Image (cartoon, grey):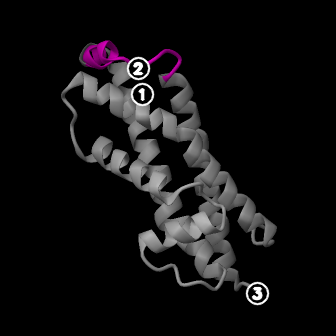
Amino acid sequence: MTQDAATRQRLQFLVRVVQRESDHLALTDRRLYQQPFTSARAIALQDNPDEAERVEAFVGRFGRLQDTLGDKLLPAYLSAEGESPGTALDRLDRAEQLGLLSSADEWLAMRKLRNQMVHEYIEDPNILADALNNGHRFVPILLDVAEALTQAIGRRGWLQ
């Protein structure tokens, strides 16, 4: 299947965005998790603006990468393949079938966590620490999906 120039440019642009977002998330993840994130660290955020900014950056970058992958790059890739992107659940199921992600259910769990971290101000330090630690555990999965999609697009010759 040949792709028109606009489709290729869109895919190339989204891959560049995903690569940049992946790099930023990985950097923030390394900086935030040099030591375990505990409820004591969560309590100390009010007195440590640098740490609070790192937490905010982590949450924002986690959510942004997941949004870009699931809501932009994956549908664009499926469309370029000649498939109807369908609903979010359809896209996730298809991505799992194609081996682009290991589990649609795991992605939905990440989405729920992302929504909790982004849309709810978490006051309980234990809940905040748990949410952030769960996000940290999901980072490699997000980065793997980004890499799998990038490689799939590259194999089709759409990155040239």
Q: Which mark is residue 83?
A: none
Disc 3 crowd, CA 10 A, few/some/many (<14, 14-19, 20+): few
Q: Which residue is mark 1?
A: 54
Give the CA separation, mark 1 to mark 3: 44 Å
Q: Which mark is residue 1?
A: 3
Tell me the distance, in whole angstroms, between the alpha carbons under discs 1 and 2. 12 Å
Q: Name the residue located 53 percent from the left edge and 40 percent from the top edge.
A: 139
**Pointer 2 residue:** 37
Tell me the element at label 3. loop
Magenta residues, start to end:
33-45
Which residue of the protein is positioned furthest toward the left in this rendering?
123
In this rendered view, identify the residue nearer to me: 85 or 27: 85
Q: Earlier in the sequence, mark 1 or mark 2?
A: 2
In the rendered structure, does residue 156 fall within the stretch colored magenta? Answer: no
Left or right: 81 in relation to 127: right
CA distance separating discs 3 and 2 = 48 Å
Which mark's residue is nearer the viewer, 1 or 2? Answer: 2
